[in-house]
Amino acid sequence: MAFLKEKGEEYHHLLGCNPAKKKRSFPTRMRPRCDIKDGFLRPVFPIHQPQQTMTRFDWLLHAAEIALQEFENEKKKKKSEIALEIHPDASKELNENKRKRKASSSASHPHPLNYVNKNKRRKVTNNSASCSAAVELPPEFKHKVREMKGKAEEVLVIQKKLFQSDIDPNNGRFSIPSKQVANDFLTPQEKQTLHSGAKIENVQFIEPNCTSVCPMTLSKWDMSANCIYNLITNWNAVRDRNRLVEGDLVQLWAFRAQPSQELCLAMVHLPTQSLI
């Protein structure tokens, strides 16, 4: 075999050409670097070698993990190189934008992070029950409460603007979102009744005109993140008699009739100028 190899090389030398090289099955850069020891093919990695106590299977798993990590790192490196080729100034612009944001933030907030501005006024929305106007039940309503043998303590339930859903005759309800309720106005027994799906009927209701009293029904809708109380039964008639329209600001008050301690409600129609 050696003789034939030498003759072949001499023959090609005389002809002035080089012998044809075998075509590789795959490029050299894709061939793993390996060495053979004890009859076992092992890849060579320029990183930490596993302990000698590991089995050949453990060694193979370890080598596969290292190869996968090198592959991921190489892919990230190529992506970053391609991005820089497409946008060579992208990294510079990103750092410049970060520096500008930091400078503007420090300029607009000269105080330390734990600084609290005590002079800053709190914003109050139109539907909040904490408006400074009409924080007490008007005198004429208090007189009406006394006529109904109501208890001295009246509780503000909610102050809100009337929405289209409150005015729509097809709905026939006045909604009271639980998250907007200013004070607790129900007893534990009443809460349990509403939670079970039942309704509280014959709730005496003083209308905004402060002269009419009609029975209302209180129900509850349970939702995923909130629950809504609703006044129904005679709400459409109350709305028409008192000429309530969308955007009107109203307050709903609760009190207890003596001696039965039954729940009673009163609605006050506030002027729009009461908004803050």
Image: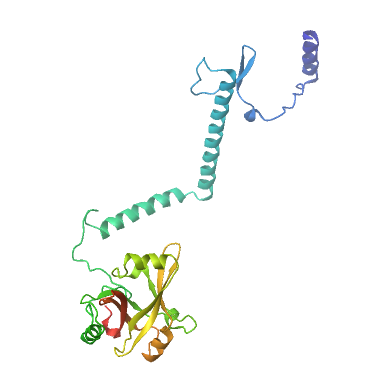
Residue 189 in which image quadrant: bottom left
- State left or right for residue 46 relative to residue 143: right
- State left or right for residue 99 relative to residue 172: left
Q: Residue at x 80, y 20 (%)?
A: 15
Q: Quadrant of the N terminus?
A: top right
User: As rendered, which of 18 and 131 lies closer to the eye?
Assistant: 131
Residue 168 drawn at (x, y percent): 46, 83
Residue 247 drawn at (x, y percent): 37, 83
| Residue 89 visible in the shown view | no
Q: Residue furthest front?
A: 259
Q: Is residue 59 above or below residue 241?
A: above
Q: Residue furthest top?
A: 3
Residue 253 drawn at (x, y percent): 29, 77
Residue 6 in which image quadrant: top right
Q: Residue furthest left?
A: 119
Q: Is residue 67 above or below residue 247?
A: above
> Which color scheme did the rendering employ for the protein?
rainbow
Residue 239 in which image quadrant: bottom left
Residue 238 drawn at (x, y percent): 39, 87
- State left or right for residue 128 relative to residue 236: left
Q: Is residue 20 above or below residue 121?
A: above
Q: Residue at x 57, y 25 (%)?
A: 61
Q: Residue at x 25, y 58 (%)?
A: 109
